[in-house]
Amino acid sequence: MNSMTTTSAVPSGLPALSDSAAYAQAVRDARRAAAAYYEGGTSALDDDAYDRLVRAITVYETEHPDEVLPDSPTDKVAGGAVEGDVPHTVPMLSLDNVFSGEEFTTWAASLERRIGREVTSWNVSPKLDGLAVAARYQEGRLTRLVTRGDGTAGEDVSHAIGTVEGLPDLLTEPVTLEVRGEVLMTAAQFEYANEVRTEHGGDPFANPRNAAAGTLRAKDRAYTVPMTFFGYGLLPLPGTDATLAAELQEAAHGALMDRAAAWGVNTPASTQVPGVVVTTVEQVVEQVERIAGLRAELPFGIDGIVVKADLAADQRAAGSGTRAPRWAVAFKLPAVEKITRLLDVEWNVGRTGIIAPRAVLEPVEIDGSTVTYATLHNPADITRRGLLLGDQVMVYKAGDIIPRIEAPVAHLRTGDEREIAFPAACPQCGSGIDTSEQRWRCERGRNCHLVASIAYAAGRDQLDIEGLGHTRVVQLVEAGLVTGLPDLFDRLTREQLLGLERMGETSTDNLMAALEAARKQPLSRVLCALGVRGTGRSMSRRIARYFATMDGIRAADAEAMQRVDGIGAEKARVIVAELAELADQIDRLAAAGLSMTEPGATPPAADDDPETPGADAGPLAGLKVVVTGAMTGPLEQLSRNQMNELIERAGGKSSGSVSKNTSLLVAGEGAGAKRAKAESLGIRLATPDEFAVMVADFLG
Ligand SMILES: NC(=O)c1ccc[n+]([C@@H]2O[C@H](COP(=O)([O-])OP(=O)(O)OC[C@H]3O[C@@H](n4cnc5c(N)ncnc54)[C@H](O)[C@@H]3O)[C@@H](O)[C@H]2O)c1
Ligand SMILES: [Zn+2]
C-alpha cells in the first residue's frame, strides 16, 4: 500500500509518438475515448491507457510546440470532448495530477513560490469517482442540476432531481447558492442499477462511474435508479444576498464544507474518509496514505485524493489555468479497473458440487498485483453479459477482493470472438448437471467432490482431525473405505486403517484417537463440517448458537432460519433444503456419538423474536468485537476462528471488519489498518492481555 507514494500510479510504458500523423491519430483516439467516457458510453480505453495516451500527446506537444492541434485534449476540461448550453457562473475545472509524495512536494513548493508565502492550511479529501454536477438552490429549493460539460457550460440534467441521495430538494435554510459536488453510484446502487437495467433488456454498465454518467443523462427511463451526491464546493449565484456571498467567498474550504453539511447536503464528512485540514506537506502525505489504505473497503469508488489550499486568500492568490485551478491537485491512486482479454473460461467443481465458471485472463497488472483469473458468478451471468471468448473485458480489483469482470467492451470486437461453451456433464465426475438454479450443480452434489468435502470436514476449523490430511483422505476414498463423512465414525475400523500403505500401529492409533476426540466437538463445528451450502465457520456458529441443538436446527423452516443474524430469504431456503438432503448423514453422525448440542447456548423460546436471541449473556453481551494483529499471552495459541468462537461463547458477536458499529477492537502486535480505523472512529481498544482478563471465565 505504501508503494502508492512512490511510483506505482505513474502510467508506465509511454507509447512515443513518432511523427505528426501518429500525433494526429492519438488526438483523435483521445477525443473519441473522452466523448464516450463523459457521455456515459463505454470508452475503448481504461483510465490508465487514456492517461498514457494523453501523456504521450503532451510529450509530443512539448517537443513540437508549433504542431499543437486546436482540438488537442491536453489543455481542456473533459479533453474538449463534451459541450453544454447552460453557462457556469464560475468555470468548473478539472484537476492536475501528482503520483507520488515527491511530486506533491514539488507541486506544493511551486504553489508557495507563486503566491509568495507558505501554505499553512491544507485540505485533504477523497477524490470521488463519479461526475461533477452543479446544483442550484433558490431560497433553499433545488431548482436546477447542471453537468460540468466543457467547464464553461454544462448540460441541464434537472430531470434527475429527486433521484440523487444526499442532494436534498430543500435545504434547512432558505439560502440561494450553488452546491458543487460529485454524483456517483455506491457499490450497492451499481448492482441494483445493472439488475434493473438488464431486466429491462439493456446492456449492463461497464462500471459504477459509467453507470452514474449514463443514468444522470438519461431522460424518460421506465425505471429510476438511485445515485449518491457528495458536495465539495459552495459558491454564490446572482440572487445570493450580499452577506452570504461575501462569506462564501471568504470562508476556508473546510468551513464551507461544514456549512454545506449543516444545510443538509451530503459531504465526505459522513464517510470513513472525511475531509481533514492539516498544516504541513508531511501531514498531507500521511493523510493521503490513510485514505488510500481505506480504499478497498469504501462502499464507493475513489480514484485519488484531492489536496487543496484551504484558505480563500491562498486560492485567490494562486488563481486558475484554463483546465485546472492552481491551488488544488489530485493525488492519483493506481487504477483498479483495467481492460484485458478474456482467454478462456474454466469450470471448477466446488466442495458442495457447485460448478462455477472462472475467467482466465491475459495477465494484467491491477492495483499492485498480476491478475490472471476473475470470478464469473454463474452461467446466467455469462449469458446476461453476452461475454465471448476473446472479448476485451473491464476487470475490477482492489485490495484483497477477488477480481471480477464488470462487462465486455463490446465495440472492441474483431469478429474472431467465439461463444463460451457450457459443460454438458460434470467436469469432475461426468455425472449430469442440475441446472434448475442459477448456480449449476453436479447431480452427485457433495459426493462429486468427496475428497475435498471430507478433507474440509477434517480441517482445523471444523472437526480438527489430526492426521487426516488431504493425502490420507485420497487414500481412504480410493481404497473405498470412505464414501461419505459418517463412514469415518461408524464404518472405518482399526484393521482397515492398518491395512493401508504407510499406516503403522502408531499412526493408526493416533488417527483413531483423533476421531474419538472429534466426537466431542461442539455442534457448530459438526454443522460446519457438513459443508452446508451458504454457511461457513461463522454462519455455522451463529446457527448453532441460535438453535442450540441439531434437533432445533432441523426443525426450523425457512422462516425460522431467517431469525439467525445474516440469513436472508434466499439463503434460508437453501440451508433448509440442504439440511433435508443431509438428513441421513446427520442421523448417522448422531448415532455415532458426535455432539449435537452447542455448549452454553439455550434454545430460543417458541415465539422468539430476532432481537433477543436466547443465549446472549456473558461479559461481551451486546458487543461487536473485531480481532486484529498477533495474539499474545493466554490467547497466543488461538487461531482467528478460535478467537471468534471465544467471543461468541462470551456472548459477543465477532466480525472481520471495523465499522462504526464495532464495540471493541482486540489489537495485537502488528495491528495496522484496522487499528487506525478504529482509532479514527473512537472505538474502544483492548490488548490481547486485557481481553483475556475480560473473557477469563470462557477460556480453555
Ligand atoms: N477511459 C477513458 O477513456 C477516459 C477518457 C477521459 C478521461 N478519463 C479519466 O478521467 C480522468 C480525468 O477526468 P476529469 O478531468 O473529469 O477529472 P479529474 O480526474 O481531472 O478530476 C477533476 C474532477 O474531480 C472531481 N472530484 C472528485 N472529488 C473531488 C473533491 N473532493 N474536490 C474537488 N473535485 C473532486 C470533480 O468532478 C472534478 O471535476 C482521468 O483519470 C482519466 O483517466 C478516462
Ligand atoms: Zn460431479
Image (spheres, grey):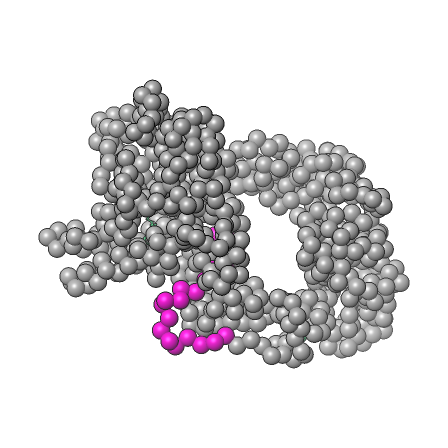
Residue at 34% across / 62% down in the picture? 44
In the rendered image, the vertical position of residue 539 relative to residue 266, given as above or below: below
Q: List x then y, in percent, for residue 18.
A: 18, 63
Tell me the magenta residue range: 397-420
Residue at 40% across / 61% down in the picture? 339
> In the rendered image, which quarter is residue 688 located in?
top right
In depth, the one of 620 and 377 nearer the eye is 377
In the displayed structure image, the side of residue 357 where residue 594 appears, left or right: right
Q: Is there any visible trace of residue 228 in the rendered image? A: no
Quadrant into which the C terminus falls: top right
In depth, the one of 586 and 387 nearer the eye is 387
Q: Hey, which residue is sitting farthest left in the picture?
A: 66
In the displayed structure image, the side of residue 364 where residue 97 appears, left or right: left
Residue at 60% across / 79% down in the picture? 424
Q: Hey, which residue is sitting farthest top in the picture?
A: 243
In magenta segment, residue 546: no
> In the rendered image, which quarter is residue 103 located in?
top left
In magenta segment, residue 409: yes
Q: List x then y, in percent, for residue 239.
A: 32, 27
In depth, the one of 188 and 443 nearer the eye is 188
Q: Main secondary structure of the magenta part?
A: loop
In depth, the one of 23 and 361 nearer the eye is 23
In the rendered image, the vertical position of residue 318 relative to residue 500, given as above or below: above
Q: Is there any visible trace of residue 181 in the rendered image? A: yes
In the displayed structure image, the side of residue 51 where residue 183 appears, left or right: right
Q: List x then y, in percent, for residue 349.
A: 63, 70
Q: List x then y, in percent, for residue 355.
A: 62, 70
In the rendered image, the vertical position of residue 558 relative to residue 155, given as above or below: below
In the displayed structure image, the side of residue 182 where residue 543 appears, left or right: right
